Amino acid sequence: MIELFSVTKRYPGGQVGLDEVTLKIEAGQMVFLTGPSGAGKSTFLKLIYCEEVPSSGSILVNGRNVSSLPRRKVPYLRRTIGVVFQSFRLIPRKTVFENICYLPRILGLSGQEQRQLAYETLRRVGLAHRMKAFPLQLSGGEQQRVAIARALMNQPEILLADEPTGNLDPELSEEILRLFLEINGQGTTVIFATHDRDLIQRVGRRVLTLEGGQLASDKVLPGKLVDTSDDDSEKSAGVE
Ligand SMILES: Nc1ncnc2c1ncn2[C@@H]1O[C@H](COP(=O)(O)OP(=O)(O)OP(=O)(O)O)[C@@H](O)[C@H]1O
Ligand SMILES: [Mg+2]
């Protein structure tokens, strides 16, 4: 569970990233975070994975106050949180396998264990057959799947995505969105930040809208998109 209590983030230059935001996201929820450019979406996510610290207020992740977490404890928190970005952030000279096994914790596993975990994780994102490919040999949608696999390697309880479809065309965006719905259907809490209202409107989920750092609305939208790939994810994508 993620809880924010009157969270404000003011950057050193005086810009307001987030302004008195209070809300709660239950474990296992899928939530969209939207709003215009500069509304505070990335700030919201950065505060949760401790890339930034709030100026005031507090943030609890699974009951633990992360707003005052000492820097040395941040890596432990990050083991429970996966993050995916618009720009994939893959290392071009490393294979898919090497890219997703790059986390220090994963590197502590034996070679056999790493291969097993990588294979299973890539299978979840539909890319088990591309383990030895290099990022530039993959399409944009496939590269994003690798980035999602990398975020899943730690088996995180929470998956944060900052404009994960920002570099993809509408068809690929929907495919990636379906993948997030599937991952959520398997129990992971997902926060998906996007300014793409069209994409959101196809899914019946909770939508948090930020404007000028404030929470302008928090509602559950009815939507039509259902995952037809299997019964479980169809249920998870239905209207709540
Ligand atoms: N590192 C920073 N230093 C100073 N100001 C910042 C910093 N990061 C963000 N801001 C400011 O905080 C506000 C919120 O920015 P944020 O990046 O969270 O918005 P966003 O909703 O993610 O926008 P976008 O859709 O363009 O990604 C903006 O006014 C921005 O200029
Ligand atoms: Mg942003």
Image (cartoon, rainbow, N blue to C red):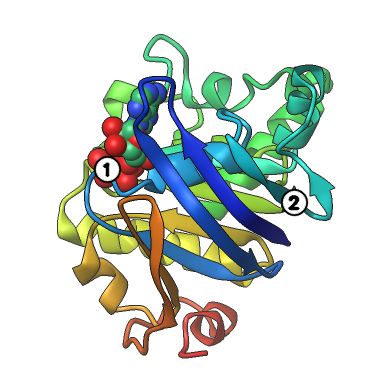
In the rendered image, the residue lying farthest to the left is 169
Please tell me in which quarter of the rendered image ligand 1 is found. top left
Q: What residue type is labelled 2?
A: Leu
Q: Above or below — where is 140 with respect to 189?
A: above
Label 1 Cα neighbours within 10 Å, binned few <14 / some 14-19 / many ≥20: some
- Helix, strand or loop at label 1? It is loop
Image point (63%, 61%), residue name: 189
**Callout 1, which amino acid?**
Gly
Q: Within 8 Å of ligand 1, the CB of disc 2?
A: no
Provide the residue designation for mark 1.
38
Label 1 CB, ligand 1: below 8 Å?
Answer: yes
N-terminal-most mark, 2 or 1: 1
Residue 76 x, y percent position in the rendering = 80, 30
Q: Is mark 2 on a helix, strand or loop?
A: strand
Residue occupying image coordinates x 76% and y 33%: 68
Please state which of residues 114 and 103 is positioned toward the viewer in this rendering. 103
Q: Do residues under tags 2 and 1 come within 8 Å of each other at their CB atoms?
A: no
Query: Taking the image as drawn, is residue 206 in sight?
Result: yes
* Position in image of residue 140 (x %, y %): 26, 38
How far from the left and from the top, in percent, is residue 142? 35, 41
x, y percent for residue 60:
74, 51
Q: Name which residue lies at 78% across and 23% down.
A: 105
**Toward which corner of the image does residue 166 lie, by quadrant?**
top left
Outermost residue on the top side: it is 93
**Residue annotated with mark 2:** 60
Q: Does residue 181 appear left or right of residue 15 in this picture? A: right
Mark 2 vs mark 1, CA separation in Å: 24 Å
Query: Which residue is pictured at 45% across the width and 40% down the height?
Result: 43
Query: Is 199 drawn above or below residue 233 in the view shown?
Result: above
Q: In which quarter of the image is residue 227?
A: bottom left
Q: Quadrant of the N terminus?
A: bottom right
